[in-house]
Image (cartoon, rainbow, N blue to C red):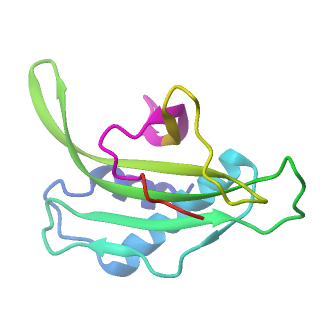
Amino acid sequence: MNTDLEQKLWSAGQGEEPYTKETWYEIIDILLDDFQKFIGENFQREPEIYLSIEYPHSPLFSQWIWSEEKKISPLSTVWSAVIGGDMVGTEAGGNVKNIFYVSLTLFLFDATSKKRLSLKTGESVLEFVFEKQANGHGCWRSFGWCKDEWGEWEDVEY
């Protein structure tokens, strides 16, 4: 990952001049390139990116991606996902600090019927986060299957 752009990601919303639309598009591209390496699979990207940079201390973005077409068999799956980033407050040692947080929510579907897949226990999304490590660099981490706690993704279709 581009070190300069990654450092911009970690310092987003921290009082510097707001980043340009072009800078945010570069950051989102490198995040998705890194996710592609993480999962070891190519995917399509929605050309339109939602980006809100009107408020320099609370930038946010989202973009949809989906699996590439492949030969379909009775065991095949396809997926779509949304990557998003925004400011969140974290508590460390009794102090609240705002940081830029990037997550990716993935929806899995049966390739033949396009029926959304979920677990019998109610988990219906796969969650990933891009986290800053002790060395200052980020990496993707999977939380695995998660519940859609607020029902915001109930209507997602392939």
Q: Residue 154 placed where, x, y %?
A: 42, 52
Vertical arrangement, residue 3 with respect to residue 147, above or below: below
Q: Quadrant of the N terminus?
A: bottom right
Vertical arrangement, residue 70 with respect to residue 104, above or below: below
Q: Is residue 104 left or right of residue 111?
A: left
Q: Could you say which is closer to the camera, residue 54 or residue 46?
A: 46
Asked whether residue 145 is drawn in magenta, I would say yes
Q: Could you say which is closer to the camera, residue 9 or residue 121?
A: 121
Q: Is residue 126 left or right of residue 21?
A: right
Q: Could you say which is closer to the camera, residue 93 or residue 35?
A: 35
Asked whether residue 61 is drawn in magenta, I would say no
Asked whether residue 137 is in view, the answer is no
Which residue is found at the position 33% from the left and 79% from the top? 21
Q: Quadrant of residue 88?
A: top left
Q: Residue 45 placed where, x, y %?
A: 59, 72
Q: Residue 59 placed where, x, y %?
A: 23, 63
Q: Quadrant of residue 43?
A: bottom right
Which residue is found at the position 54% from the left and 50% from the top? 106
Q: Residue 109 placed where, x, y %?
A: 66, 53
Q: Quadrant of the C terminus?
A: bottom right
Image label count: 0
Residue range corresponding to the magenta coloring: 129-153
Q: Is residue 138 left or right of residue 84?
A: right
